[in-house]
Image (spheres, helix red, strand yellow):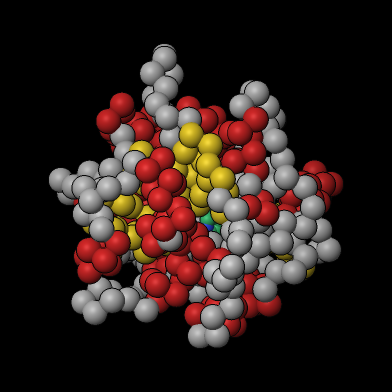
Amino acid sequence: MGQFEVVHYGRKKDNIKSPDHLGLEAAKKVQRFHSSFALYKETPLVSLKILSRALKVKNIYIKDESYRFGLNAFKVLGGSYAIGNYIAEKLGRDIDELPYRTMISREVKEKLGDITFISATDGNHGRGVAWTANKLKQKSVIFMPKGSAAERLENIRAEGAEVSVTDLNYDDAVRLADCYAKKNDWVMLQDTAWEGYEDIPAWIMQGYTTMAYETYLQLKEVKPTHIFVQAGVGSFAAAVQGFFASVYGEDRPITTIVEPDQAACIFQTAKANDGRIHPVKGDMNTIMAGLACGEPTTVGWEVLRDYSDNFVSCPDYVAAQGMRILGNPLNGDEKIIAGESGAAGFGFISEVLRNQELVWLKRELQIDENSVLLFFNSEGDTDKESYRRIVWDGLYSRPIL
Ligand SMILES: Cc1ncc(COP(=O)(O)O)c(C=O)c1O
């Protein structure tokens, strides 16, 4: 059976600056920008009451990002906000002065001239970048890692991008995109940061706070006791973590970062705890394609390091199990279509709460009958063939000992 490993950081109480760049006021500004899009509609926050009873917790909430802008994943929030900020900066304006209508106007296009945005992606980020570039009547070039799903490639191509699958892993595809950007004077629009490349990734991370802010409003008076966020480079997790840490301070929910054991770069960095980033190299064979990243984003790691309580590394079958449970709800609960990366956080907990051998982990995560658990379904069935093989045919089931 695959191994579960956890690194427990707990609360830090020393003088750490509140992550207000991801907090309420920052998120309101981001949401103002996104809500100017004709397609904008907040995504559902689903409460799985019957399942909570069965799993002996108080409530389970799932923010369902499969509904975001008709793109089946949350990622477009980041790419669009970064492009918006890039354009605002070029025009010497504030992004509040660039609502969607203005941003896609002929006047703005004439001022900007032709721009090519370039990025590397496992699918969702590239689709968001291509979608936004398309709306702006600009070009996009997208590189994908080897083994990328044909459906994800076609979805990017359908947005007018020049897209190709490389024979590289995610991190090397990012480096290749960066070389092309430098050589051709294109705009590198990557969702991961490194020393000297921070502005755009920081805007992308901020862009994701729309999702956290909507959740906060939808929860009304309810405060979750626990949040579980899956991580690739860690930008998505840091946006969620930063928002709730800024809003709740010391009373924030216990937050756990979930990664596949084949690509657990944030887990390894947390485990080493030596002030350095610890990349994972190689093919990173995991069904959670969106999480198959070997190098944590520097701007996200700083937030996760200071505020997250736990970091876990877990086997692929938890994501598959999460997809099956969410897609086949108990009577009275809503159905949620979650892709491999989308189901990771929930799948991990469904295993912890159902497998007697993992009681130790439930205890370590401090989950009991009063717990209110919050998850983010970050993608729907972005690879439908794989979705059916997992949900219909039962691929990647828990190994029987
Ligand atoms: C569906 C999905 N969930 C989660 C993530 C993780 O986001 P990040 O790379 O910012 O950690 C990704 C990244 O591509 C993704 O596509």
| Residue 135 in picture, x, y percent from top left | 53, 64
Q: Is residue 325 above or below residue 318?
A: below
Pick the quarter of the image with the N terminus: bottom right
Q: For the point 52% across and 64% down, which residue is it?
A: 319
Residue 154: quadrant of the picture: bottom right
Pick the quarter of the image with the C terminus: bottom right
Q: For the point 45% across and 53% down, which residue is it?
A: 358
Residue 219 in the figure: left or right of residue 169: left
Residue most toward the top?
15
Q: Is residue 309 visible?
A: yes
Residue most toward the front?
401
| Residue 256 in picture, x, y percent from top left | 44, 43
Residue 188 in the figure: left or right of residue 211: right
Residue 188 in the figure: left or right of residue 258: right
Q: Is residue 124 above or below residue 172?
A: below
Residue 352: quadrant of the picture: bottom left
Q: Is residue 62 above or below residue 328?
A: above
Foreground of the two, 105 or 352:
352
